[in-house]
Image (cartoon, rainbow, N blue to C red):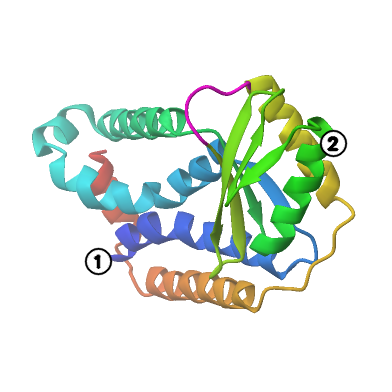
């Protein structure tokens, strides 16, 4: 892979890893919606998709005729497809940098405050009066936990209130720094350093960009 394609493919991914590393090295958990979580992942992968399947399937004649507009159109198609994927997923709240048990305790406390009839069945929680049914999921490697809706029949206003209350509950929390955050941070810096070296050694970098864009 030449310097230009390496830059396009890996720079967004390195930035994503850098941000994740900072989050995991902090002393506070962070809560995001599933939409934001998947949107961030889509941005991280856009470079790899651009120099992978998009470039592979892009007709050469189209680039020669329309130049950068062809790539802009491809980017719009990718963004639209990813947006459709994000909007079709079940409502989800993702908690970064907090272990599953502590997040479950917070969810239990907040849910009970919202609905006195809250009850649990295994890893699933039901707020019958508020129209919320969800299950707990965890990703121990990154110390992430998620609250994912069960089924399409959900009260989205209650979900918004649940998100607000969980975020408020996290404001006073302090957690131990996740050592894996240092690995992600180090990997992102290593990728960026390698890209800079590769760019510096490639005298045709600017010309490669012109050729790729069909300018």
Quarter of the image with the C terminus in it = top left
Q: Is residue 151 magenta?
A: yes
Residue range of the region highlighted in magenta in the rendering:
150-155
Residue 112 screen position, x and y as percent: 80, 39
Please state if 71 lies on the left or on the right of 176 as rendered: left
SS assignment at label 2: helix
- Give residue 67's mark: none
Residue 141 screen position, x and y as percent: 53, 70
User: Which residue carries the number 2 mark?
Assistant: 113
Q: Vertical placement of 140 versus 39: above or below?
A: below
Q: Please give the name of the residue rendered at 67% of the width and 73% of the height, measured from the top-left corner.
A: 178
Q: Is residue 18 visible?
A: yes
Residue 168 screen position, x and y as percent: 84, 42
Q: Please give the name of the residue rendered at 36% of the width and 57% of the height, measured from the top-left corner.
A: 9
| Mark earlier in primary sequence (2, 1) | 1
**Could you say which is closer to the camera, residue 9 or residue 3?**
9
**Could you say which is closer to the camera, residue 151 or residue 195?**
151
User: Which residue carries the number 1 mark?
Assistant: 1
């Amino acid at each position: 892979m030449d310097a230009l394609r390496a830059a396009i493919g890996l720079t967004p991914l390195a930035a994503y890893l850098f941000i994740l590393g900072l989050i995991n090295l902090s002393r506070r958990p962070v809560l995001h919606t599933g939409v934001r979580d998947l949107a961030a992942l889509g941005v991280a992968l856009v470079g790899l998709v651009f120099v992978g399947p998009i470039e592979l399937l892009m007709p050469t004649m189209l680039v020669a005729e329309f130049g950068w507009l062809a790539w802009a159109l491809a980017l719009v198609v990718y963004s639209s497809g990813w947006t459709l994927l994000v909007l079709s997923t079940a409502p989800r709240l993702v908690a970064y940098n907090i272990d599953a048990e502590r997040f479950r305790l917070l969810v239990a406390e907040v849910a009970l405050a919202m609905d006195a009839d809250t009850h649990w069945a295994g890893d699933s929680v039901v707020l019958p009066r508020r129209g919320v049914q969800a299950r707990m999921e965890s990703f121990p490697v990154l110390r992430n936990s998620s609250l994912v809706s069960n089924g399409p029949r959900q009260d989205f206003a209650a979900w918004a209130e649940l998100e607000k209350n969980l975020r408020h509950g996290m404001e006073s929390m302090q957690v131990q720094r996740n050592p894996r955050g240092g690995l992600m941070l180090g990997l992102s810096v290593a990728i960026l350093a390698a890209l800079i070296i590769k760019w510096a050694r490639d005298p045709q970098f600017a010309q490669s960009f012109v050729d790729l864009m069909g300018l």
